[in-house]
Every structure is written in structure tokens, then in C-alpha cells.
Amino acid sequence: MITSYFKYLLRSGNEHAIHSPFLFDLYTKVIKVKNDNHPDYDELKSLRKALLSSNEKIEILDLGAGSRVNKSNLRKIKTIAKNAEKPAKFGKLFHRLIRHFQPETILELGTSLGLTTLYMSKAKPGTKIISFEGCPQTAEVAQRNFDKSGVENIEVVLGNIDETLPAALQKLNRKLDYAYFDANHRYEPTVRYFEDCLPYAHNDSLFIFDDIYWSDGMTKAWEEIKAHPQVTLTVDLFWIGLVFFRKEQVKEDFVLRF
């Protein structure tokens, strides 16, 4: 991944490399925001601090690619928070993206401890978030965090996403505005989840893929997703990739600094 990151640094640009008015506006006003001090962030910062200091142990049922740093199924919450939760800058980015696009339907593949879910939840409390988690004890911790925060717009779907995702999609009436893919970090499941969700995407949908350079398989999946004929615009921020389906957009792939 280190080699991939150096290649990313060499290839990445800023707003001066953007030709699309849509993306220029999105990059300068939403993605590349330095001083974002929304009131929601203080509570979530406190929650992150609490999770990072928790010695409570839970048993992990890992249905995905597993952890690179911990092979034991019995893990402390603080270890999960350190290695599995996205840094605050990404939570804040998701918060801004949702405030900007105002999606009505949001899916999150991979709840983990629920911190990223809460960033999305608080960005638009009136929108229901369906979050998928395969591990019962992890989902239980996430639900505790949701209850403490007083949010009521998150539904956690427990079980193997291979089985639960298709069933949940059928209830969406063919409309999916926003999806965050952070579950099984392998090539085949990532592409399959993308293809499962694709019939429900529309012109203004946004799909976000996590850890696109986590492995050769994930990078292969990212390249395949970028090349899909329904995808018109992608943004590579190294740690995550943004995918748009705007038919009025010339097909382009951007690598931008974040």
C-alpha cells in the first residue's frame, strides 16, 4: 500500500486539474474543506475517544477479508476503533457530502462500531440509514452507541451481507441515492455488491468505496468499477473512491488530493 500511496501522490492534483464544473464545485466547497467545525463533531469526537480507551472485549465474526493487524477473534473495542474505524476527516467528509446532496435513501455496508454511521446519520436526521453488519457483538456495540446519541434513523441489518443486501434492495422501489461500501474487502464481493446496487442507482446517486488500494483485489475491483459503462465520473482520494452516474457528464476519472 505504501508504493500505491506514493504513486497516488505523484498522480494526484487539485482544483486546477478539474475540468468539470460539477466536480470543481464539489471539490472546492465540499471535499477540500479545511475548517469544518460543525456542532455534530464534538459529540462524535468524544465518542471516538471513549471507544479508543475501552478495554471491553467482544468476539468478532469476520465474514470478510479479515484484519491485517489482529488474527484473534477476541478483540478489545479500543483495538477495533483504532484499526477499523475511519479517521475523523472521512466522517466529516461523509457528513458534508450528505448535507450537500441531501440523499433520501442511504445504505452502509459494514457498520463496525457505528462511528461513521453516526456522522452520516446526524448529517440528515430525516433520512433513514440501513446499515449492514455481519458480526452480532459488533452490531450490539454499534446499537449502544446509536442509543446513547439519541438517533432514530439507523436500522442495523444483521447477517451475511451476501444474503441480506439483495433482500433490502428489493424494498427500495428501485431508488438508491447514496451507498458506502465498507464490508468485504475482496475483489469478488466488492464487485458483486456494486452490481447488486447498480440497478437501484440513478443519475444523482453517489457510491463510495472504502480502501480501494487495500489489496491487489480491491484495486482490481476499483478499476473494474471505474470502467463500467454506467459510471461516468470517479474521484480517487486514495483511501476512498467516489462514483457518480451523471449522464450529462463526460466520462472522466480524477485523482485528487484530500
Image (tube, grey):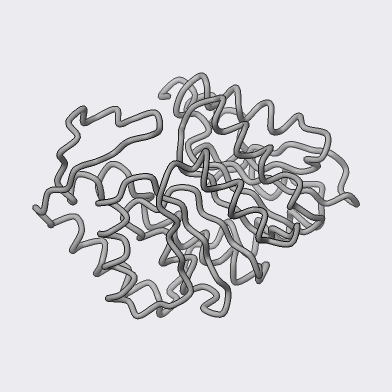
Instruction: Give the residue drawn at x 59%, y 61%.
Output: 106
Q: Horizontally, is 44 left or right of 218 in the view?
A: left
User: Which quarter of the figure has residue 225?
Assistant: top right
Residue at 81 percent across and 42 percent down: it is 232
Residue 116 sits in quarter: bottom left
Q: Residue furthest left?
A: 55
Query: Which quarter of the rendered picture does the N terminus lie within?
Result: top left
In this rendering, position of residue 229 left or right of residue 40 = right
Measuring 38% from the left and 72% from the top, which residue is drawn there? 41
Q: Is residue 35 above or below residue 84?
A: below
Residue under the image location 21 percent in, 31 percent down = 70
- Residue 42, how many percent across, how many down? 32, 74
Q: Position of residue 241 (x, y in %)?
A: 59, 41
Q: Position of residue 64 (x, y in %)?
A: 40, 32
112 or 215, nearer to the observer: 112
> For this view, does 218 lie left or right of residue 74?
right
> Quick check: 194 left or right of 141?
right
